[in-house]
Image (cartoon, rainbow, N blue to C red):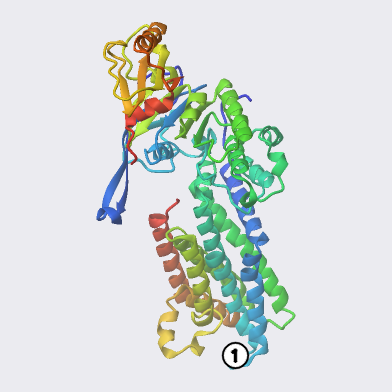
């Protein structure tokens, strides 16, 4: 075999798009990830619409339920799914190998963010496809702010997922992210609105990324308003967790 | 240090500390204290050393995977610690643990990695050459050690690099795979690639390397071509390339003073078991057998072998278990 001189990288954008596509396809082929990303949120959506759990909050059960389910989707994909995948990639040396290719560390992270966004788009389409026939009527004024907030929430949860995946063993990442998914999903202000939580929890939950995203999405899709506090809280979590991940992420 | 015609990698006085470690009361541990080397284009350069000697840390600093504490590294004219995608595209890396995702299948994985390069090597050629077609539909997690190593080598070569790093390339290889991989490495070297490999297997270094650096305790302890190293610590004689190790068993407690030249000592390693290492001549052998005949001694066993790199290594780094 001959050796050519002048080997060159593919353009940056192409490398990131390729990695995003590859990671998204890997996520969508993984059965456990699909259960977490699609099946459980849909079950929760149906559960919330057939039980009286959310009665008395908004004009209909489905309108109150859908924003929370979208927040749950973001947490599933960006935090739990992506965190577990990254944790095991780290264990198997995949992160180290890919960072020696032209993709590099920055390209790898950019690809992961892209994959999270791609899967999130698919989740939103599926949830909408189920919610509209069930009578979902989002406030039209809140659609754009709501979707922007969803992306911001995904950014905060991606940073947190990377922080966990990059600092503890993959088995611990698995345990932590799954446990937090259940805890934050149930009592962290995601699917159950804050006013249904105990008084003690109400004072702290709006400072959590889960509470900020859940309440922010409900304010957008129910009333069509932008919740400035929620935006600030999510920005803070994104910056803090992102900085901590950059500082403490161990590649091997 | 030597100066190859066209260096691809130069490491000068590398220092690497890791930690702080709780087992050292929160202090740093110096895993590489002073390693220097030069690797050339069209050559196989081997870093040879026991496990934990600092070989992998050294080449991971050269690959930009670890930040060095001190010293300088120049890889293809750039500093790998700060260089970007342009340098990474010219360097292929095969990691010790492979670094391949367990759920991936070989061909889509290689195609994905090839996409990161502007002019990748043709996939079919590599797949066929490394025998990957025979397991192309199996997930990485189900591959044997040898299959994983071949796939990792293909992944390192897909970008058509000028420099190739191989960390313990024959780990887990069956004899057929090893032959295949070694032939390919020699061919790539002849094609002009600069190849840097680490190994703790003396045989690998002896078969593959044009130049060997022996690393021990985080520093260089010896270097040279295999032929030069085999003469390491041997006195200057016209017969330096006749370095042999002689073993024989006879009566215990024999005194061989004056039988062989003074620089070749016959040691009784166990009761009645004797060893001599040195540049032995035919006349030395004749003198020894004549002495046996004169004293009516018939050895119980007698063997002689060329000095191996392993003997040199053990002479240099000591024989104690660490």
Residue at (51, 74) in percent of width and height: A213
Image quadrant assignment for residue A30: bottom right
Taking the image as shown, residue A26 lies to the left or right of residue B196, namely right
Nearer to us in this view, A163 or B245: B245
Taking the image as shown, residue A113 lies to the left or right of residue A136, namely left
Taking the image as shown, residue A67 lies to the left or right of residue A205, namely right
Q: In which quarter of the image is the C terminus of chain B?
A: top left
Image quadrant assignment for residue A76: bottom right
State whether residue A93 is above or below residue B160: below
Residue at (59, 76) in percent of width and height: A142
What SS does tag 1 mark? helix
Residue at (61, 30) in percent of width and height: B179
Nearer to us in this view, A133 or A52: A52
Q: Residues within 10 Å of mark 1 (few under 14, many from 20)?
A: some
The subunit carrying tag 1 is A
State whether residue B157 is above or below residue B272: below
Place of residue B294 in the rendered image (x, y in percent of width and height, measured from the top left): 35, 9
Task: Say which residue label 1 marks.
Answer: A53
Place of residue B161 in the rendered image (x, y in percent of width and height, measured from the top left): 56, 31
Q: In which quarter of the image is the N terminus of chain B?
A: top left
Nearer to us in this view, A101 or B199: B199
State whether residue B225 is above or below residue B271: above
State whether residue A103 is above or below residue A85: above
Place of residue B6 in the rendered image (x, y in percent of width and height, measured from the top left): 46, 19
Place of residue B217 in the rendered image (x, y in percent of width and height, measured from the top left): 32, 37
Say whether residue B129 is visible.
Answer: yes
Residue at (69, 69) in percent of width and height: A125
């Amino acid at each position: 075999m001959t050796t050519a001189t002048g080997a060159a990288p593919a353009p940056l954008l192409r490398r990131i798009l390729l990695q995003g596509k590859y990671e998204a396809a890997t996520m969508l082929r993984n059965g456990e990830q699909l259960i977490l990303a699609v099946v459980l949120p849909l079950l929760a959506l149906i559960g919330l619409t057939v039980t009286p759990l959310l009665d008395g909050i908004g004009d209909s059960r489905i309108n109150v339920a859908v924003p929370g389910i979208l927040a749950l989707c973001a947490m599933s994909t960006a935090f739990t799914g992506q965190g577990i995948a990254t944790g095991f990639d780290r264990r198997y040396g995949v992160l180290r190998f890919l960072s020696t290719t032209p993709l590099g560390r920055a390209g790898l992270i950019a690809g992961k963010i892209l994959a999270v966004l791609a899967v999130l788009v698919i989740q939103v389409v599926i949830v909408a496809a189920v919610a509209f026939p069930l009578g979902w009527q989002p406030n039209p004024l809140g659609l754009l702010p709501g979707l922007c907030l969803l992306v911001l929430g995904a950014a905060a949860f991606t940073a947190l997922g990377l922080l966990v995946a990059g600092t503890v063993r993959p088995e611990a990442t698995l345990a932590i992210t799954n446990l937090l998914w259940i805890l934050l999903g149930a009592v962290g202000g995601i699917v159950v609105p804050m006013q249904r939580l105990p008084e003690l929890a109400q004072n702290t939950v709006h400072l959590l990324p889960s509470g900020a995203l859940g309440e922010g999405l409900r304010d957008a899709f129910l009333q069509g308003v932008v919740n400035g506090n929620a935006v600030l809280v999510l920005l803070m979590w994104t910056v803090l967790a992102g900085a901590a991940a950059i500082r403490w992420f161990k590649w091997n | 240090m030597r100066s190859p015609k066209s260096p691809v990698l130069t490491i000068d006085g590398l220092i690497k500390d890791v930690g702080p470690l709780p087992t050292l009361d929160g202090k740093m541990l110096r895993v590489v204290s002073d390693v220097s080397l030069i690797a050339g284009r069209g050559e196989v350069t081997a870093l040879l050393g026991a496990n934990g000697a600092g070989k992998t840390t050294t080449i991971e600093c050269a690959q930009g995977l670890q930040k060095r504490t001190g010293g300088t590294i120049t890889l293809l004219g750039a500093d790998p610690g700060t260089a970007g995608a342009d340098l990474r595209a010219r360097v292929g890396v095969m990691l010790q643990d492979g670094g391949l995702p367990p759920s991936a299948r070989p061909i889509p994985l290689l195609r994905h990695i090839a996409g990161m390069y502007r002019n990748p090597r043709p996939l079919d050629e590599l797949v066929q050459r490394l025998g990957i077609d025979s397991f192309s539909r199996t997930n990485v997690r189900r591959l044997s050690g040898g299959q994983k190593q071949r796939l990792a080598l293909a992944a390192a070569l897909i970008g058509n690099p000028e420099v190739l790093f191989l960390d313990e390339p024959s780990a887990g290889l069956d004899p057929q795979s090893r032959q295949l991989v070694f032939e390919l490495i020699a061919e790539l070297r002849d094609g002009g690639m600069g190849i840097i490999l680490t190994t703790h297997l003396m045989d690998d270094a002896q078969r593959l390397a044009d130049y060997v650096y022996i690393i021990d305790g985080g520093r260089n302890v010896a270097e040279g071509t295999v032929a030069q190293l085999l003469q390491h610590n041997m006195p200057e004689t016209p017969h330096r390339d006749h370095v042999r190790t002689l073993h024989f068993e006879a009566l215990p407690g024999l005194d061989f003073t004056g039988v062989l030249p003074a620089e070749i000592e016959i040691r009784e390693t166990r009761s009645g078991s004797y060893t001599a290492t040195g540049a032995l001549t035919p006349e030395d052998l004749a003198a020894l057998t004549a002495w046996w005949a004169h004293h009516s001694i018939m050895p119980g066993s007698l063997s002689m072998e060329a000095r191996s790199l392993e003997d040199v290594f053990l002479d240099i780094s000591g024989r104690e278990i660490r």
